[in-house]
Amino acid sequence: MSIEKKLLKAKPVCKVKFSLAGDQYKSASSILLVGDFNNWQLGETPLKMAKTGVWSVSLDLETGKSYQFRYLIDGSNWENDPEADSFIPSGLGSENSVVAL
């Protein structure tokens, strides 16, 4: 799992790449990124699997903000990103990952 951040010089935006890699994800049929940036709407931000077996998606997010998010694996398993900048209680008995820009 990783989160890569690249600030864009022309806009107050950061290109953020969310990635999941590892044997536990190779057999997944779908992985969704769900969070503040897409109003927690399922299906809005699917990750795509590369030939290397790494799932990823890139988003342009406004700088100066923090965004809560989680991954939804195969429609039933919610996971956090251990490389997130922090974690916040979700109010649903678990925590959400946070990326700070």
Image (cartoon, helix red, strand yellow):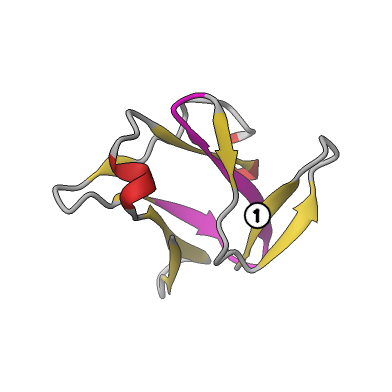
Residue plotted at (57% across, 62% down): 82
Disc 1 target residue: 97
Q: For mark 1, does the 10 Å Cα neighbourhood hold few (<14), some (14 to 19), or many (20 or more) residues?
A: many
> 5 or 74: nearer the eye?
74
Is residue 93 shown above or below 64? above
Across and down, in percent, residue 15 comes to 42, 62
Asked if residue 32 is positioned above or below residue 50 in the image, the reply reads: above
Give whichever of 54, 56 is nearer the camera: 54
**Residue 66 horizontal/vertical position (percent):** 68, 60
Residue 41 image position (x, y, % from top left): 58, 27
Quadrant that contains the N terminus: bottom left
Q: Reply above or below: 70 against 77.
A: below
Question: Which residue is painted at 46% across and 35% down in the image?
Answer: 32
**Magenta run includes residue 59:** yes
Q: Quadrant of residue 91?
A: top right
Kindly indicate the quadrant of the structure image that contains residue 86: bottom right
Q: Which residues are magenta?
A: 58-75
Q: Give the quarter of the image for residue 84.
A: bottom right
Say what amino acid the circle numbered 1 marks. Answer: Ser
Q: How many numbered circles are shown?
A: 1
